[in-house]
Amino acid sequence: MFRIERDRARFREIVRGRLRRDLRSFLSSSELLGRRGEETVSIPVTQIETPRFKYGDNSEGGVGQGPGEAGEPLEADESQGDAAGGAGEQEGHHILEVDVDLAELADMLGEELELPNIEPRGDRMLTSNGGSYSGIRRVGPKSLRHFRRTYRQALKRTIASGEWDPRRPSVIPTAEDERIRCVKEQPKPESSAVVFHIMDVSGSMGREQKEIVRIKAFWIDTWLRKQYDNLEVVYVVHDAVAKIVDQETFFHLRESGGTKISSAYDTCLSEILERYRPEEWNIYPFHYSDGDNWSARDTERCIAVLRDEILPRVNQFCYGQVKSAYGSGQFKKDLDSALPDEEGLVTWAVEDRDGIPDAIRAFLGKGR
Amino acid sequence: MMRQSSPIDPSLRPWAERIEALARSAGLDFFDVVFEMVDPSQVNALAAYGGFPVRYPSWRFGMEYERMEKGRQWGLSKIYELVINTDPTYAYLVRSNSMMEQKLVMAHVFGHADFFKHNAWFKPTDRGMLDRMAHHGSRIRRFVDAYGQETVDRFLDQAISLDNLIDPFLPARELARSADGLRPQGEAPRERSFSSLELHRGAGFKLPSYDVLGHLAENAPLEPWQRELLRIVRAEAYYFVPQRMTKIMNEGWASFWHSRMLTHGLLETDEIVDFADCHSGATAAVPGQLNPYKLGIELFRYAEEKGMDLFKLRQVHNDTSFIDALVDEEFAERCSLFVYDRNPKSGALEVAERGWVEVKRRLLQGLSWGGTPRIELLDDDYEGRGELLLKHQFEGRELDLSEAGEVLKNLARLWRRPVHLLTTEREESRLVTSDGAEVSAAPAGEIESSEAA
């Protein structure tokens, strides 16, 4: 059904249009977070149905068939009937989902927030393992024999050695004539990046604060993934001590206790030194906190580590402060006054979900 | 046109012939039935086009296809067969069906084919709809070439949103009128009888009318291509009306016959259990839903038991009148029918009662007017300002007002003047107005009283 594919493509195009239009609302909602796969994100399509005169919610109810006394709730599950046997016509009212490439979503994000593309640092050439069968050598498996080159070689040899007889043109390749295709490795520029998502999980960071962090992290990942072929994400949580966790833990953990931000910066630094050397990686640490630190001494230590160790090694360090009921928001003030001229440092305060797009723009808008 | 489908499998042909002979000997009568084989995704594509692969291009069909394909891939839904109301009657069999399923489906198809040919509500439909749909398709493609996909889509979106603003009884009425005195008795009107609808064109449009779409197509200030497009949407909407009005009967009739035929010698012994499984799946009572296959087959069996003429019933009734004629205390009790409602306290759907009178009332309420609200066009020069006045004939169920507002916007854009809708919300009469951009609502006391006067 060739026509239906065209109609389907048109439908998907319309969905993309809607998504582009409604991107702002997706930017501050957690709706897409659980919908991300490896390469795609599935977008729930609402409001695309054609409006028609129809009965409203207050007209629910009707006639059913089966057992049950008055007052008994209807069983919603379909355990009683073998639904598979029913005809396909009775589709339910589930929301349709359409898969959109992450790269495409990143493009939309870039358009919406006018984000510049990132210029990777340096131009390191990496030899990638791929390459193509564009090389030629004299030995190798017969199945890769380059027929034309082999015969051309044989013809040259035949003519050169005087065996060529135009009346009986025959060319028989010998072992020396064999030309075999081989993989030619092509050095190609490759860009790798690592993102550190560092979150304060001390008692004052509430559910909503974590959700904001989560949404921001989703969009930042989406964008950076588009910019770099190879993106690694390291999740760090900290209260008084810092540890590296997996994604699941990062988003669901709730710790309580004091806050020692320097512990997280130390962890980040040691990761950079040990695993993500700046010569090979573009490095993006993001730190989210409500701005309360344990002591002014620790804040001083943070500033020192940041200024002397981390900032020289990373593309950009972003500090996103999320407003919480208990947080003082002091840390951002301290950073701003101690490091006013650091180009690689971006600090931004977010009041609530509506501030997320601006924060993303602040973090990614410099194209570093 | 049917490039990707192929003629019936040689292994099925003898069965098709045998089932056809059996169907005829049982008294079923139909146009020639042409079976075609398709893949599961092709049958979804066909279903998305309402059975007509030649239809005009629209993202809506693509969306329907996407939805059905997802359902199929996740194993939620499966289409076994598709029958088209045309002469000859095309029926699509899905290649992945088992032999037993194909037999069941073929028997089912002959039931539908008989119903299409003989049910009174299908009489006015154009049996050459395949050609007509193809013509519509090529017209709309030409519009797209001339005015651009976006422009045509935008107008089509508006038109489709109005496609249930038609009078489901109009085709039958027109047919009866044109047949009166014009034809010798007993002879059915021939092909293209649907075109009698087109007599409606021009000045002879009388208000009030339920054929709002028809009125718009003839009297709204439209470009010629828009007018033609609106007529196309209307013609297709009328073609599909009988399917909506006879869903329970049509499926019941087909299920009644497939079950009868298959249990009378068409099954191998090792197929009987599978048949029982498949049949009971199709006619299962799912809590909270009314399965048309189930209710339909029960109604025909009940009628048979009462010694009624089944063939007559299938000829003269639609779902509403059929249920009105048959459902009584005995039937409601036997089928364990009940009324359910949402409990305002718990928010859950609950069994409300089992009294057969209420059951019947609610059944009829749900089915009347093809299951959609009844909207009548009262005036096209409301208060002398050239504005439309519509009325929702309130029968106990309220409109979804936010959607209604969107529809009114579309209506106002087509009419290029404000439009008004009288409806009832929480037992109060309301006048909802749109000028195409905004929607507002006001109490409508005065209007109703002036209406009454």
Image: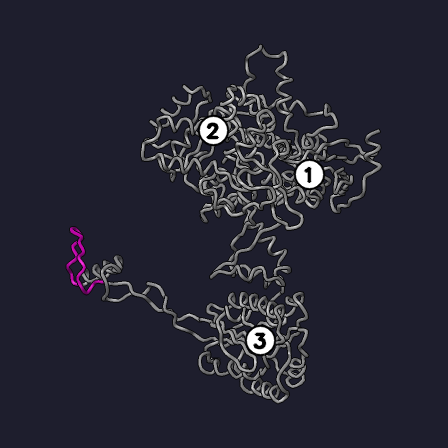
Determine the CA span between mark 3 and mark 2.
Answer: 64 Å
Q: Nearer the viewer, mark 3 or mark 1?
A: 1
Query: Residue B322, can we see it?
Result: yes
Q: Name the kind of residue labelled 2 in the image.
A: Ala
| Chain hosting mark 1 | B
Q: Residues within 10 Å of mark 3 (few under 14, many from 20)?
A: many
Query: Residue B148, can we see it?
Result: no
Q: Nearer the viewer, residue A55 or A137?
A: A55
Q: Name the kind of residue labelled 1 in the image.
A: Arg
* Residue bearing the label numbered 2: B254
Image location of residue A34, percent across then percent down:
53, 61
Determine the CA span between mark 3 and mark 1.
Answer: 52 Å
| Chain hosting mark 2 | B
Region in magenta: A161-178
- Relative height, residue A253 to residue B200 (above, below): below
Image location of residue B150, percent across then percent down:
62, 45
Determine the CA span between mark 2 and mark 1.
Answer: 31 Å
Left/right placement of residue B217 relative to residue A233 reads right
**Placement of the C terminus of chain B among the 4 image quadrants:** top right
Numbered circles on residues, count: 3
- Is label 2 in a helix, a strand or a loop? helix
Q: Name the kind of residue labelled 3 in the image.
A: Val
For the stretch drawn in magenta, the main secondary structure is loop
Checking the image for residue B397, the label placed there is: 1
Q: Along the polypeptide, which appears first: circle 2 or circle 1? A: 2
- Is label 1 in a helix, a strand or a loop? loop
Q: Nearer the viewer, residue B223 or B231?
A: B231
Q: Residue at x 36, y 36 (%)?
A: B273
Left/right placement of residue A57 relative to residue A167 reads right
* Residue bearing the label numbered 3: A201
| Chain hosting mark 3 | A
Image quadrant assignment for residue B125 = top right
